[in-house]
Image: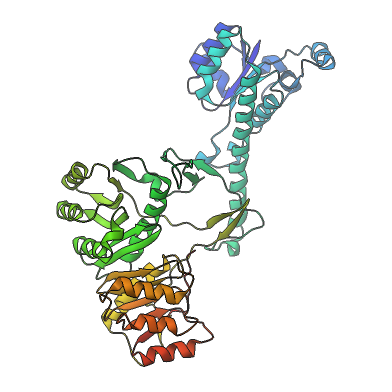
Amino acid sequence: MKALISVYDKSNLVDFAKGLLDTGFEIVSSGGTSRYLSDERIDHVTVESVTQFPEMLDGRVKTLHPMIHAGILADLDKPTHVTDLKSNSIEPISLVVCNLYPFLSNPSIDLIDVGGPTMVRAAAKNHKHVGIVVDPADYGDILAELNANSGILSDQTRLKLAAKAFNHTAEYDREISRWFKSKVADSNKEDLISRFDFKDEIELKLIKSDLTLRYGENPHQFGAFYKTEGKKSWIDDSVLHSGKKLSYLNIFDADAAWKLVHELSNITEKKPAGVAIIKHANACGAAISDNLQDAYIKAMEADPVSAFGGIVGISGHVDLNLAQIILDKPQADVLIAKGFDDDALELIKSKRKVLRVITAPKPVGAQVEFRVIDNGFLVQEPDILDSLNGGTWTVVTEANPDESGWLDAALAYVVCARTTSNAIVYAKDCQIVAVGAGQQSRVMSAEIATIKADGRAIGGSAASDAFFPFRDGVDAIAKAGITTIIQPGGSIRDAEIIEAANENKLAMILTGQRHFKH
């Protein structure tokens, strides 16, 4: 029995090679692997001694020879194949051990393996007679089976190894393909744009995360978290300090809270501290302040009933004082922050044992978003908010917002953009006081927000994620005591809407940018 070994990753190779010799295999090897085996004093024959042809072209041509590939590809159930082997004095190879150059570690022409993938594919194609091993982690199981079965692998094992081998070469080729595409793009700078390139084909590979989910959206549904290959996520470098494992919805809502709280922190340099509370994908509370304690209290006071069991995002570092405030407020399911002082973390863990406490880095920001539609995908760029109060916003009414009106409008605008449409959000004194979300009519969202505000929105600002189709939405907002409305505009009834704002003595800001979130 012959085993051909040609590997870049030499992990556990010595013990595996010795085990093969003990099982009765003759080892054939080439290049760096042969030199490695020689240094370890492991008996083997070189590929050159089999092919009677030297390595050439700086090692680019070693195993690409009929004496090797006929031994791998021969179907021993076919008499003509057996005859061909005998007439050419070629011995069959029953085991190929090969893994490829780590192309991603230093992408270059020299790290594009040719002979390796050819051997792997040949062995995998002929898995009926050849075992192909591409992963050092499999060495132990392979040796155990060979020892138990007189050097023979079962049909099922060879089939599994072949499937793994084809996946190995497919991933390798995919890496090389991406590299070549990037080189083509680099050669044509005008094609390099910051926006996502909606080509005829999108290559998407998802890698299952080590993060184990308790279940999916409901307990009877299985769930898992997959990462886009080659892309980072804030979840990758987050740390779960305490509490139960995260569920599908925990991660979904935590992502919404963590992204929103970073947008809140960018509204104004004067109030960099932000806190957001998410419940069922929508904010039920949010606030900005010059300190985290005040922001946390305001965010919780927006809707304490809904805040219970919510997901809380905190833009900064939690100290002992803030930890004590957290324990005095309604209990959340998940608490995610930039960091925790040691004493603050220990206090929270001791008092709220089921609370999932997470530290996380800043969100990365996706370049593209996917949504599954049956067996297809809707693909879009993410909704990036335009510059807050940055030149594109226009006051179109007789009344103008004062400084606090502008700031509350910006806060309501950010939260509204991240709230399920149709959305109306009220803010007062840098605190969200009411959210009307997910209604089929905009006026209903406004009426719900007015009820929730219960008088707390007087003198505040309101945001709408899209234009008002009729004036009834403006009239409903006016009943809450709002003094400023911010909305994109663009309705055929804009003149009527602006007149309604003037009649109600409201200031109205048009942004020119809709922010639906479905």
Relative to residue 198, is residue 84 drawn left or right? Answer: right
Q: Nearer the viewer, residue 104 or 362?
A: 362
Relative height, residue 313 to residue 206 (above, below): below
Residue occupying the point 73% across, 12% down: 91
Q: Position of residue 274 (x, y in %)?
A: 28, 63
| Quadrant housing residue 442 | bottom left
Compared across the picture, whether 403 is left or right of 91 comes to left
The figure's colour scheme reads rainbow
449 w.r.t. 478: above or below: above
Q: What number of labels is visible?
A: 0
Q: Please state if 412 lies on the left or on the right of 98 as rendered.
A: left
Q: Position of residue 365 (x, y in %)?
A: 44, 57
* 370 lies left or right of 325: right
Residue 128 image point, x, y percent: 71, 20
Is residue 327 visible in this depiction of the protein? yes
Q: Is residue 58 visible?
A: no
Q: Residue at x 19, y 48 (%)?
A: 341
The image quarter in which residue 434 lies:
bottom left
Res. 113 image quadrant: top right
Quarter in which the N terminus is drawn: top right
Q: Position of residue 415 (x, y in %)?
A: 37, 67
Residue at 69% from the left image edge and 16% from the top image edge: 93
